Amino acid sequence: MKRRTFLTAAAASTLARPAISAGTKPLIFVPQTNLTSLDPVWTTATVTRNFAMMVYENLYGRDESFVPKPQMVAGHVIENDGLRWTMKLRDGLLWHDGTPVLARDCLASLQRWLKRDATSVIIDARVAAIEAPDDKTLVWRLKKPFPLLAHFLSKVQPQPVMMPERIASTVDPFKQVTEIVGCGPFRFVPDEYVSGSRAIFARFDRYSPRQEPASYTAGGHKANVDRVEWRVIPDSATAANALIAGEVDWVELPQPDLIPMLKKQNGVKTGLLDLYGTVGILRPNALHAPTNNPGVRRAMLAAIDQRELMLAAMGEEPDTWRAPMGYFVPGSPLANDAGMENVRVRKSIDEIKRMLDQAKYGGETLTMMHPTDQIVYNAFCTVAVDAFRKIGMTVDDQLTDWGTIVQRRPSKEPPSKGGWSMFPAGAPGPEFSDPLLANTVRSNGPKAWFGWPEDARIEAAYEAWIDAPTDAERRKLEVDYQRAAFDSVPIIPCGQYLPHAAWRSNIAGHVKGSAPVFWGVEKG
């Protein structure tokens, strides 16, 4: 497929703004898509993760080297030969409603999160009980040592966010939280939230940041602006022109074709804020034909040229994408060659058609949920649909918006009854740095991420990796894990992309990582 072409200019328009009270310093940010869900436990949508990082906090953060660091906890003590972890909450933590953060709030939040997170089976197999013996203490009593516990609790998607017990214990994790009360540096302003238009955040003046320097999600989360306004602008050219005109301050994901133009503008800066990038994937539904057939999934994997997808999405700038990749991020210590011939060696269309015949593909319709308001995902779907049709698959390419996909993908109904066969997604690069955090690869059936794949080989390698006594043993198991994933294809990897952001030159203090964070940012 030839490189996409886009309009690189559009008439700048005056964007309506909500009233801003005197004395505030609004930072106006254009997110990559509309914010439709406010519950990071209910969904793994990237925009919801970014929202959650402003409002909520985790017990542990993760620094730029992926090392877990205490965040809400002051620290922990490991006793009884690794079978008891005692965590103490740090002083000064308050919910946005002004009440103190208590250990029982955190306990209820953990219990709600574990009912949804695909890695909950790890906790179930290793934790006898989680207790809150007093207002400041959490105690983990383990069945066997689990040295990766803090690493587990520092994950960012889906996040183990903390919320008051009155919310966490009463809202079913399979239903969305509607009252947003966190303890992070910014509080959500619900009265000014308009889905499809804007979301407003105000600095929480009673927040007490840690004293360590900010590093990725760890360290001091100091809010330097009084107010942050997320402005939803679906058209990338309009967003770029709003940035040039000074109507917005920061665009999270400019269309890659617009970056060269933005670099030439006075008062505008561009650069890589996302150090680790995003792993693009296509997620098949393992419950319904045709994608419930591993043989069909292997043929679909063979039909995808990762380089073609990356060129369509990101362009020819060499520092903005990496492909081909397997089930670990390229260049990471865990990346290995097991099964990589599946993505490095291109098969002919006739060879892939024979793979479909051998898998007994019967012409069933592939229902692709295709978000046109997501630049990268739109490109992925456009290329993938074309590739699948070329190998003889019947494809229903359903053009929609990302918010609709987020609402629809929990459905387990067949495509003929409003379900789906496949959708594109992205996971932070760090989530593919080891098996523990690769939520989209987990294949534990009903407890897996949307799509619900089930594969005993992947799960066996995963479990063994968690308990491996040495790094050398883990390296062997990572090979088994990747080989099993290439055989089962719980996801089709599309490559790693590292998009550049754009911002006004009077904005400084960005903390780099794999998500836009607003602590440390200053507006001159």
Image: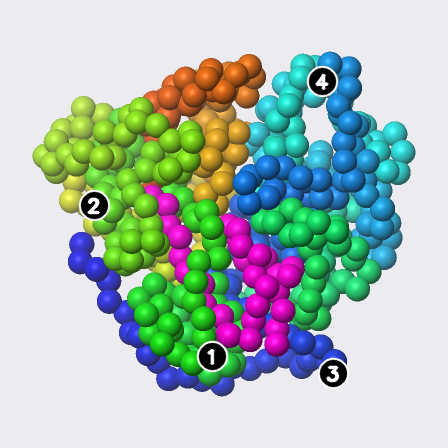
88 in the magenta segment: no
At label 4, the amino acid type is Gly
In the rendered view, tell whether residue 330 sits above or below residue 145: below
Viewer-nearest of labels 2 and 4? Answer: 4
In the rendered view, tell whether residue 159 sits above or below residue 475: below
- The CA distance from mark 2 to mark 1 is 41 Å
In the rendered view, tell whether residue 479 sits above or below residue 504: above
Marks counted in the figure total 4
Label of residue 22 in the image: 3
434 vs 509, nearest the viewer: 509
Q: In which quarter of the image is the N terminus?
A: bottom left
At label 2, the amino acid type is Ala
Label of residue 387 in the image: 2
499 in the magenta segment: yes
Viewer-nearest of labels 3 and 1? Answer: 1
- The CA distance from mark 3 to mark 2 is 55 Å
Residue linked to disc 4: 82
112 vs 457, nearest the viewer: 457
Residue linked to disc 1: 267
Viewer-nearest of labels 3 and 2? Answer: 3
Q: Is mark 1 on a helix, strand or loop?
A: loop
